[in-house]
Amino acid sequence: MKVFSFFRKFALPCSLVLGALGYLIFANVPFLQPLGDAVGPRFVELMPVVLFALLYVTFCKIEIKEMKPKAWHFVLQLIRTSLALLMVIAICLFGKNYEAKVILEGAFICFICPTAAAVAVVTEKLGGSIGSLTTYTVIANIFTMIIIPSLFPMVEKGADVSFLYMSMMVFRNVTTVLVVPLLLALLSRKFLPRFVDKVKSVKDLGFYMWCFNLTILMGETLRNFLHATVSGWILALLLIVPLVVCLVQFAIGKAVGRHWDASISAGQALGQKNTIVGIWLTLTFLNPLAAVAPGAYVVWQNLVNGWQLWYKEKYGKLKW
């Protein structure tokens, strides 16, 4: 019971530690390596399924009236785009230095990344609005469809990102990850109300599903980090810069949200990023070495959320 109580209090940091330890054990203990090589990819393939399930569980609790677009949804998109543009300008000014460009590309991808699909899960635990965050996530992905094809060629001259290709990728992502579980949840509430009541009665079910996914994601992040072929000080900056970016985005989001009495939701909206998409975009279109940055962002954003959850449970309110 003490172990479970400890995990419940520090679920997100514990998930990060378990993911890191799991990878290190299965990667370095000789007789476990074959098992790790066989099972690891299967766990990665399982992540989208778990994400779909946790969003369905979360959307079963959604209030339709909260899904109306708010002004802060669009203000944050303007800020997100402006921050990404600042990084593009910095890359144009200092990009002739290879090492500086790698670091700036890492910061750029952390700013331009769309909001994580699972943002509603943590937001619910913190006391924010599930419906408002769901609408914001859809809006953020639509903006992503426009700004990534526009800005990527400015960062990497060889990054040929067509609007059609990016539009289809975003449409597929939004449909499979957000729209389908949302529609299923709404249909379930109408035709299977007893089942929905049972799902809602299981406290923090979606949150612990997210912890499971986070454990796998941390293992993958550590693997990429250990295999990165960059010098020590560049690697250090690729770890530290995402921390600064993370804190800046959470702070700006919360500051904007206060004007609409949505500090929690807006902070999560701008701060919690879909780093899986960020890593893929970096590996595909930018310098692959910069992919360390969105990987590090995974750790920082979940440590921030972990601290927020601990503080809220201990003191009954959020300090930040």
Image (tube, rainbow, N blue to C red):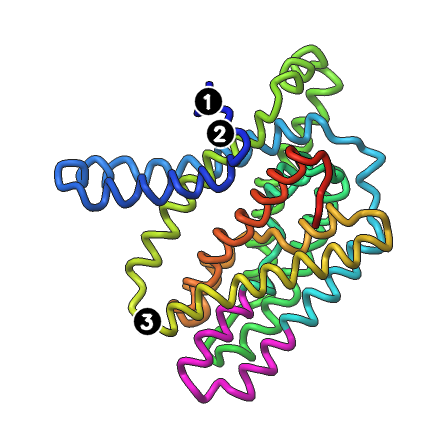
Q: Secondary structure at mark 1?
A: helix
User: Majority secondary structure of the magenta segment?
Assistant: helix
Q: Does the residue at mark 3 contact the one at mark 1 (Cβ under 8 Å)?
A: no
**Mark 1, residue position:** 2
**Mark 3, residue position:** 232
Cα–Cα gap, marks 3 and 1: 39 Å
**Mark 2, residue position:** 6
Q: Nearer the viewer, mark 3 or mark 1?
A: 1
Which one is nearer the viewer's eye here, 263 or 133? 263
From what the image shows, is residue 126 above or below residue 260? above
Residue 178 x/y as whole percent = 63, 40
Is 65 left or right of 229, judged from the image as shown?
A: right
Which one is nearer the viewer's eye here, 270 or 306? 306
Three-letter amino acid code at the position of disc 3:
Gly
Number of numbered markers: 3
Which one is nearer the viewer's eye here, 150 or 97? 97
Q: Does the residue at mark 2 contact the one at mark 1 (Cβ under 8 Å)?
A: yes
Residues rendered magenta in the picture: 85-109
